[in-house]
Image: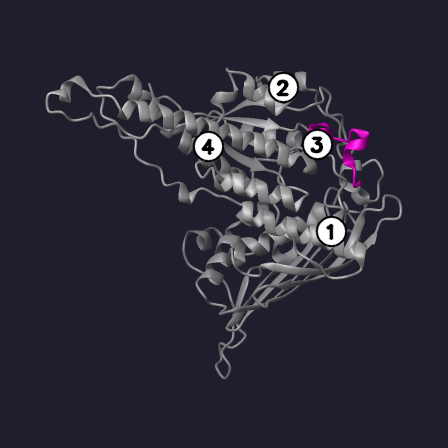
């Protein structure tokens, strides 16, 4: 009988997005994925965004056949669940991401330390079969059960927290650290990244971007406290009780910048690379909703350490809603200009035929000068890339967006390695096919998360002061 390899995933935060997207997506990945636990500080999660009442933790527990907990710490402390997790999805309030992420990374690092201690002990032993020859028995590396993280955006709402969280995630390369910017995992994103990294645009000199959505229903309704307030925990809005007293510091602002601009900033930094357009200063102006005071429009100029000129703007004032019938999509546009050409990416994210990823080369005097190229790359990502504009993936059906797939693939791979390692230790006479896993291939979005938080934080500070501010 063939044994099905299963990875065990916890969902932390059981609000509107978790119940409408994450949990159903995980269930669709059965039997290879098991929902191992759900966590929420409230036994009765609430959301002002849902058209119907959310399920209670008891109801969710029955529906998905898993235990429930009121905190991450309680879940990890349960010996039947905590040590057996392969991954965790963090869908809590923005302000709580740091606390939850640090607890999960600490768990992963502790597991690694235990495995290292076991391996050291095993390597110190001498097998009786080889003792005569005076040789130590050769043993494979002992693999710990790695813990992978899929975290909703933004990574944090504080630059200090973002930097600490990034450092901790980098210190744990055995675990993937994925921020759920679904647009950043589209095939077009990989193609755009390849075009830029291969030097086809030449030296990047200018970036301009806009993201406009019909979201006044969200940002100008006082009921939506977690999306509009600088102190979202004061009224106990959805999942906010996961924030500890030590981290309840008022935000510099809340609204469209944190709620939406994180998507487009993450896409830009996903494609340009780690050391391009490093933000140095930001000047930003904002307008605010009349009822909530949340920012609903912004325009910013970002000064970069490498001399790139960078402008970005966005508004919630587009008429309509993506959740209406018929849905009205967001209008998104990114243009990246280099000395040898430009990359153009834009359209209506509900109407694919409104745009596509285009490469235009600079070839003065040649007929190719300024001509659009599509597809503009070769390889697996280009082969998967559809002709059209695809940005965020908010489809509730199916097995989830590509970001979810990358996360679950990491969970499955490391779980299989761990199971093989355990099987070898339990049957020491058997040959082992466990090999050292190359952790460099695991996704780590923490630098993209830091860049996004740095810029949005500076946007709010600049808007308040009326001056350009240094990026922290």
Q: Secondary structure at mark 2?
A: strand
- What residue sits 67% from the left and 24% below the top? 40
Which is nearer the N-term, disc 3 or disc 1?
Answer: 1
Q: Nearer the viewer, residue 191 or 150?
A: 150
Q: Magenta span has 92?
A: no
Looking at the image, is mark 2 or mark 1 earlier in the sequence?
Answer: 2
Toward the viewer: 110 or 365?
110
Name the disc covering residue 69, or none.
2
Q: Quadrant of residue 53?
A: top right
Sequence-wise, which precedes: disc 2 or disc 3?
A: 2
Q: Nearer the viewer, mark 2 or mark 3?
A: 3
What's drawn in magenta, residue-wise? 229-247
The Cα–Cα distance between marks 3 and 1, rounded to whole angstroms, is 34 Å
- The disc label shown at residue 213, or none: 1
The residue identified by callout 4 is: 411
Residue 450 percent location from the top left of the image? 60, 48
Q: CA distance from mark 3 to mark 4?
A: 32 Å
Q: Earlier in the sequence, mark 3 or mark 4?
A: 3
Q: Residue furthest left?
A: 133
> Which residue is tagged 3?
246
Name of the residue lying farthest toward the bottom? 365
How crowded is the residue under tag 3: few (<14 C-alpha within 10 Å), some, or many (20+)? few
Task: Specify the quadrant of the image occupied by residue 111.
Answer: top left
């Amino acid at each position: 009988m063939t044994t099905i390899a299963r990875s065990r995933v916890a969902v932390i935060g059981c609000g509107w997005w978790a119940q409408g997207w994450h949990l159903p997506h995980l269930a669709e990945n059965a039997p290879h994925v098991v929902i191992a636990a759900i966590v929420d500080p409230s036994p009765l999660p609430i959301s002002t965004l849902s058209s119907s009442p959310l399920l209670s933790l008891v109801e969710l527990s029955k529906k998905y056949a898993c235990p429930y907990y009121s905190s991450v710490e309680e879940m990890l402390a349960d010996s039947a669940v905590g040590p057996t997790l392969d991954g965790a999805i963090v869908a809590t309030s923005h302000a709580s991401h740091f606390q939850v992420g640090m607890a999960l990374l600490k768990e992963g690092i502790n597991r690694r330390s235990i495995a290292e201690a076991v391996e050291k002990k095993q390597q110190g032993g001498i097998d009786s079969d080889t003792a005569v020859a005076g040789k130590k028995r050769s043993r494979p590396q002992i693999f710990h059960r790695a813990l992978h993280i899929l975290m909703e955006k933004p990574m944090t709402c504080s630059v200090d927290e973002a930097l600490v969280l990034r450092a901790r995630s980098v210190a744990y390369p055995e675990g993937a650290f994925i921020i759920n910017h679904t647009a950043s995992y589209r095939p077009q994103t990989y193609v755009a990244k390849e075009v830029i990294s291969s030097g086809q645009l030449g030296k990047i000199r200018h970036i301009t971007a806009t993201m406009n959505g019909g979201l006044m229903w969200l940002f100008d309704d006082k009921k939506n406290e977690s999306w509009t307030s600088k102190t979202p925990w004061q009224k106990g809005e959805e999942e906010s009780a996961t924030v500890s007293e030590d981290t309840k510091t008022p935000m510099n602002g809340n609204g469209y910048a944190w709620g939406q601009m994180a998507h487009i900033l993450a896409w830009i930094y996903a494609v340009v690379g780690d050391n391009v357009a490093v933000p140095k200063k930001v000047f930003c102006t904002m307008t605010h909703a009349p009822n909530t005071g949340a920012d609903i429009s912004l325009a910013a100029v970002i000064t970069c350490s490498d001399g790139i000129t960078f402008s970005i703007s966005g508004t919630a004032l587009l008429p309509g809603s993506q959740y209406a019938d018929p849905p009205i999509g967001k209008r998104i546009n990114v243009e990246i200009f280099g000395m040898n050409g430009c990359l153009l990416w834009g359209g209506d994210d509900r109407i694919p035929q409104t745009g596509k990823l285009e490469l235009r080369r600079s070839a003065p005097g040649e007929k190719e000068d300024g001509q659009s190229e599509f597809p503009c790359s070769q390889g697996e990502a280009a082969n998967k890339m559809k002709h059209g504009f695809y940005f965020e993936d908010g489809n509730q059906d199916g097995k989830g967006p590509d970001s979810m797939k990358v996360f679950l693939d990491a969970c499955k791979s490391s779980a299989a390695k761990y199971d093989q390692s355990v099987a070898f230790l339990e049957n020491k006479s058997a040959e082992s096919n466990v090999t050292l896993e190359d952790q460099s291939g695991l996704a780590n979005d923490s630098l993209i998360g830091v860049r996004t938080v740095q810029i949005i934080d500076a946007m709010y500070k600049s808007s308040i002061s009326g001056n350009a501010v240094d990026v922290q």
